[in-house]
Image (cartoon, rainbow, N blue to C red):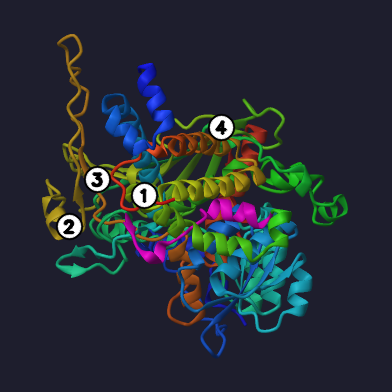
Amino acid sequence: METPTSSINRRDFLAKTAAGAGAGLVLGAPGILRAAGASPSNNINVALIGHGKQGQVLFESMKNIPGLHFQAVCDIWDYNRKAAEGHVHGLQKHMPKAYSDVDEMLATEKGLDAAVIATPDFWHSPHTVKCLEAGLNVYCEKMMSNTIDGARAMVKAMQKSGKLCQIGHQRRSNPRYRFTLDQLINNNKICGQIINVNGQWNRAVKSSQNIAYKPSLTIKPEILAKYGFKDMHQFMNWRFFRDLSGGAISDLGAHQIDIFNWFLGAVPKSVYATGGNSYFKEREHFDNVMALFDYDTPQGQVRAFYQVLTTTSSGGGYWESFMGTEGTIKISENSSVTEIFKEASPAPKDPSAPPPDKPIPLSWDHLVQRGLLGRKAAAPPPAPAAGVVDSRVSKPPEGFALPGELNKPPHQPHLENFFASMRGEAKLNCDAHHAFLSEAPIYWVNPSALSHQPIVFTNEHLDV
Amino acid sequence: MTTESTECCKSTPATECCKSCPQENLGFIYGAFLLRVWLAIRAIQTGVEKYSGTVGSDQPIRIDGKVNDYGLTAAEPVKEYALSHYHGVPEALMTKFTHEPIMMQMKWALPLYDKVLGPALLALGFAILLGIFTRTSLFLLGLLYVSLTWGLILIKEDSGIAWLGIHMILIVMALMLAKHNRLCLLKKW
């Protein structure tokens, strides 16, 4: 069975966006058939595949979602598998079936409705394809795969199976992000024309160290080899190896570059990146990467800069900033970093530009009164240096805040959306095809950095 | 301290000694009381914290006077206390314990300990604070700290072991000063 998304390709995506669908409309509202997957009891039988750190984060979120039954757990490491059994037992008061091999699990377990996959990136595609082919709906962590062909295979398997496949770009279901896109950027256009986008994930050296393990818990070499790992160090630190992951740009950057594309309602037309092993010299992947993306959006040209640094936490951690002529929205999963600024002086009208849909208001007081924005204390004006104020210095912008918070773990709304879609109560916020359209440019960041060359995207680069 | 009063304290019960040499004994009485209160508060608040949890605000924000459709709520998660939040052994440690071979042999022990730990800290803390069977309560609190120490040795939490060692020293000091115990509900044991 073919889902409606199978008819979407990058050209359609751009055309629809250019036709005035509005920023984020296409990426934000993917249509997909509702999959009939839930058991007759309306309990969804779930298999947990991969129960490392990220698997445990997802489980902690799923604990809060009613109607789930964790039927089976699967992990090649005894340590994680027993942890999974313990966590499920703690929740359900009975042990799930435990497996070390996905094939064995799929061959043995009857009645599974869904798989939640949080294995290393290079296993995402094989595991997702196997589960979809076995008739399961799949929630798979991002990045879709360590290779673009692996990601393509996931899209094709979803389309062929007719099952649901949600990719774990959890910000797509975060109420704070959805509100910001719908209400602030699209409906009220508080940024004016977005010209630049900035994003970063800066992490200190201390938080970027190799992950250690107890020698007594080492997996047997033949098992490691069977599942594609050279040794236990590589198993624990697969994110640093080129054959197993996309490195920091896909590990951390993919979440945020996805937001660039989602909010702009477009995919970039080129990337130029640079990176290096400036501190962690023994690692295969770069420890710092900087990338420039060029977009043509319905509003006009946009240039975006993204950096992922694993050698410093300066600059406020991780966030995405959308900078327009009227205002800037700096948003993050970390609400304490989120800030909204209004330019002190409205931009003069461009005589060549088409007239705006609505007159641009001089104040955002009405948005605060309506509950669309919160107030933030204004920053003090900069002290004049030596009595001279450069006339070119802009007045400091006025500060605002998002009006509300998310009162759940950050992954929970995305998982809720997945299970609600299985029940026919919602549509996926990030199915594999839309995730692919957004992720595809990210696969070309490392090649650009390695070759020191910009890459201008063609259909071969970005299409399924 | 005079030789006379020292001899007095050696040969007479603490209460009578106190009557015979009140000035010299006041320091011991204060010391015993302060140590008792410290250990009690330490145990009680630790027990209370086991009933704490973080919950998000369920108060939806309103836009144009209507509840928003996005699920945005009014405030960031807040800490609260409730029986439903109870967690005797912190989850991070619980995971470590479940993987220890010794604990795997005694699968029943960890859930039981998890259930008992919080109430035990509260009961012993209040008993010590109110002076109910002070010596026995201090002794039992010491045993509880020994059990915690054993668990931390198992998972190689050396700094926690050192902290508990300091607690044990304080308990032993409290036991040594117990004969100067005042403001007690039940002086037996």
The answer to whether B102 appears left or right of A28 in the picture is: right
In primary-sequence order, the first of circles 2 and 3 is 3
For marks 2 and 3, give the CA distance. Answer: 17 Å
In primary-sequence order, the first of circles 4 and 3 is 4
**The residue under label 3 is which amino acid type?**
Ser
**The residue under label 4 is which amino acid type?**
Lys
Q: What residue is drawn where x is 55% and y is 85%?
A: A36
Q: What residue is shown with label 2?
A: A358
Residue A41 coordinates in the image, percent (x, y)? 53, 89
Label 1 close to label 2 by CB (< 8 Å): no
Give the crowd class for mark 2: few <14, some 14-19, many >=20 residues within 10 Å: few
Looking at the image, is mark 1 or mark 2 nearer the viewer?
1
In the rendered image, the residue lying farthest to the top is A386
Q: Along the line of sight, which residue is nearer the eye, A441 or B39? A: B39
In the rendered image, the residue lying farthest to the bottom is A40
In primary-sequence order, the first of circles 4 and 2 is 4
Q: What residue is shown with label 3?
A: A352
**The residue under label 2 is which amino acid type?**
Lys
Q: Secondary structure at mark 4?
A: helix
Residue B44 visible in the current orientation: yes
Q: What residue is shown with label 4?
A: A206
Label 4 resides on the chain identified as A
Label 4 and label 3 in one chain: yes
Q: Secondary structure at mark 2?
A: loop
Q: Hey, which quadrant is residue A227 in on the image?
A: bottom right
